Amino acid sequence: CFKMLYFISACCGKAMFDAKEYKDNPGLSIDERKVNGDASEAGILKFAEKIRPVAEFRVANGEVMTIPFNSTNKFMITCNKISELPGQLRLCMKGAPERVMDQCSHILTSAGITAFDASQKDVINEQLSCVMEKGERVLGFAMRDLDTTLYPENFEFNTDEPNFPMEGLTFVGLISLLDPPRES
């Protein structure tokens, strides 16, 4: 489960470390490095970077399509190649947990992928309430490996009028970030 959560958190994002700053100060820790991107993406990038270099991982699992986050959808989608499965594409989604869960028909558990039923959603919603009451920002993560016969590596995605599935995804998990109050 965690391996898949890492894949999505590393690939489904636009934030990047500031290359010039790191070049000028190569001794900076991951937490001290400047990130070009919003606060949530910066937190996820720093989390993922502590496990494995994200830039290298993104190159190895190249992005072939993206639907950027917007306040209407409240999610972001990328489609990436999978370095471990040549020719296979993976749709990755991150965003508001309720929006992500709405697109999921399955859930990834330690036992594998199973149907995502109402009782599982209730448990997740209880956990969400607990974490959000503590002032943490929570994002949901989901994925779907695309059928290679319908979506070969050279498939031309249309993001304006999606010609690919955005439902029937597998819920992978949640990441919460501390979201301290700001002066403004």
Image (cartoon, grey):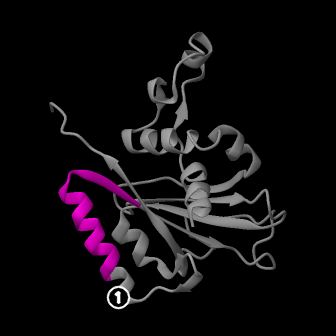
Percent from the top left, x then y, of residue 69? 44, 53
Disc 1 packing (10 Å; few <14; some 14–19; many ≥20): few
- Badge 1 amino acid: Ser
Residue placed at 15% from the left, 33% from the top? 184
Residue 131 in the magenta stretch? The answer is: yes
Q: Which residue is drawn at 84% across and 62% down?
A: 86
Residue 121 seen in the figure: yes
**Residue 28 at x, y percent in the picture:** 53, 19
Q: For numbered disc 1, what is the local secondary structure?
A: helix
Q: In this view, does 160 lie to the left or right of 100?
A: right
Give the residue at x 43% y 69%: 100
> Going by the image, does 51 lie left or right of 41?
right
x and y percent of residue 53 in the render? 65, 38
Magenta span dominant secondary structure: helix
Return the residue found at the far front. 110
Residue 58 belongs to the span the image colors magenta:
no
The total number of labels drawn is: 1
Compared across the picture, whether 34 is left or right of 128 comes to right
* Quadrant of the frame with the N terminus: bottom right
**What residue is pinned by disc 1?**
119
Q: 71 left or right of 35?
A: left
The magenta stretch is 122-139
